[in-house]
Image (cartoon, helix red, strand yellow):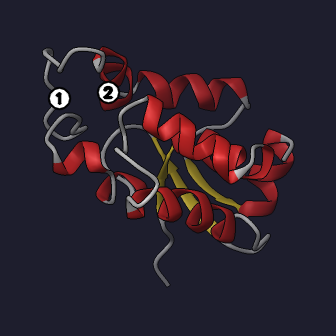
Amino acid sequence: MNIPIIRGHHLESAKLTFKIPYEAMKRGLIDLGYIQDSKDPFLNFTYYGLKKLFENPEQEFNVVVGGLDFLCHNCPMLTRDICNPCKPTKTKPKGMNFLTKYEGETADLEILKKYNLQPGTYSVKQIRQRMRF
């Protein structure tokens, strides 16, 4: 059985799907430049896909620092070559400098530290208990 890989900072995205409404996620993804409008499939993939995966307490994830996970592989920033954890760049389009932290390991390490997690395999139940969602 393949256990999906998830980057540490995407755990925070999963938590958000349980804490904020769909419209707030849409506005956030548009404001940050991930999507251009509500028709972008990445919105539904992120909101409903993460929510569904994190509803199953037995689902396991391999939490990692750096690299690409299933969310990265579907991200418009990767396909537009703006953000790529496998090939980080120092120069970003105007307003996209915040992505540098996510290309590297910084954001993943911050989230893992925040919730007292280490890279490794966790069930959704363990993650949700630790992160309180």
**In terms of image quadrants, where is residue 90?**
top left
The answer to whether residue 125 is above or below residue 113 is below
Seen at 33% across and 51% down, the residue is: 75
Q: Are marks 2 and 1 in contact (CB under 8 Å)?
A: yes
**In terms of image quadrants, where is residue 47?**
bottom right
The answer to which of 126 and 14 lies nearer the viewer is 14
Seen at 55% across and 38% down, the residue is: 27
Q: Residue 126: x and y, percent?
A: 79, 55
Q: Residue 63: x and y, percent?
A: 53, 50
The answer to which of 12 and 109 lies nearer the viewer is 12
Look at the numbered disc 2 and give the secondary structure of its residue.
Answer: loop
Q: Residue 35: x and y, percent?
A: 37, 45
* Label ID, residue 109: none
Nearer the N terminus, badge 2 or badge 1? 1
Q: Residue 5: x and y, percent?
A: 45, 59
Residue identified by numbered label 2: 104
The answer to which of 117 and 38 lies nearer the viewer is 38
CA gap, disc 2 and disc 1: 7 Å
The answer to which of 59 and 94 lies nearer the viewer is 94
The amino acid marked with disc number 1 is: Pro
The answer to whether residue 53 is above or below residue 92 is below
**In terms of image quadrants, where is residue 87?**
top left
Seen at 38% across and 55% down, the residue is: 69
How many residues crowd mark 2 within 10 Å: few (<14), some (14–19), many (20+)?
Answer: many
Residue identified by numbered label 1: 88
Q: Is residue 8 visible?
A: no
Q: How many marks?
A: 2
Look at the numbered disc 1 and give the secondary structure of its residue.
Answer: loop
Seen at 26% across and 42% down, the residue is: 77
The amino acid marked with disc number 2 is: Gly
